Amino acid sequence: MIKKILIPISGDDVAPRFDLAKEVVIIFLSGNNMIEEQRTFVLQETSAEKLCHFILKENIHILICGAIEEEFYQFLKWKKVTMYDFVISTWERAFKCCIEGSLKPGAILYERHLRDGLYDKDDGNKKLRNMIN
């Protein structure tokens, strides 16, 4: 069975708000999680209602998105769409985590960059280094 995953995007990232997404990517997966096809759609206007209609019309199985209003979240859940909301990430990384089974709602998947050597790379808590040697 082919599964369809839809991700509202903004550039290379998961769109921060579901209702303001101007583009979506749909990825078609085969039964063994192999990508069969990938399509990007530019939406005519930003609207949560129209995006929900598009999701249902395209028979989407999984939605990975940023912030989404509760009424649209509940509506899509009721329609049996698997939801990963409040995801902050590049869309490709979020997709990869989804097919690996490690994606969770609220996931922040950006890597933390060390700036100016202020963080100790070996310290798991990322405590500030003692700046006075």
Image: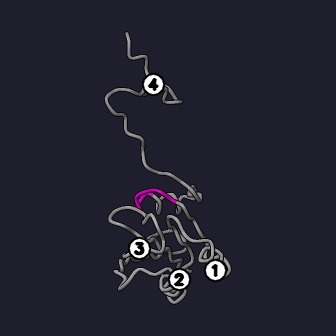
Residue at the (32%, 65%) spot, across then down: 11
Q: What's the amino acid at mark 3?
A: Ala
Residue projecting furthest to the top: 133
Q: Tell which of 106 and 4 is nearer to you.
A: 106
State the residue position of label 1. Answer: 75
Q: Which of the marked residues, 4 or 2, is nearer the chain's N terminus? A: 2
CA separation in Å, label 1 and label 4: 45 Å
State the residue position of label 4. Answer: 128
Q: Which of the marked residues, 1 or 3, is nearer the chain's N terminus? A: 3
Q: What's the amino acid at mark 1?
A: Phe
CA separation in Å, label 4 and label 3: 37 Å
CA separation in Å, label 2 and label 3: 12 Å
CA separation in Å, label 1 and label 3: 18 Å
Q: What's the amino acid at mark 2?
A: Cys
In the image, the segment drawn in magenta is: 87-93
CA separation in Å, label 4 and label 2: 45 Å
* Looking at the image, residue 54 lies above or below residue 109: below
- Asked if labels 2 and 4 touch by Cβ distance under 8 angstroms, the answer is no
State the residue position of label 3. Answer: 21
**For residue 77, side relative to residue 120 (left or right):** right
What number of labels is visible? 4
Quadrant (top left, top right, bottom left, bottom right) of the C terminus: top left
Q: Residue 86 lies in what quarter of the image?
A: bottom right
State the residue position of label 2. Answer: 52
Label 1 element class: helix
State the image coordinates of residue 82 (x, y, percent, origin top left): 61, 72
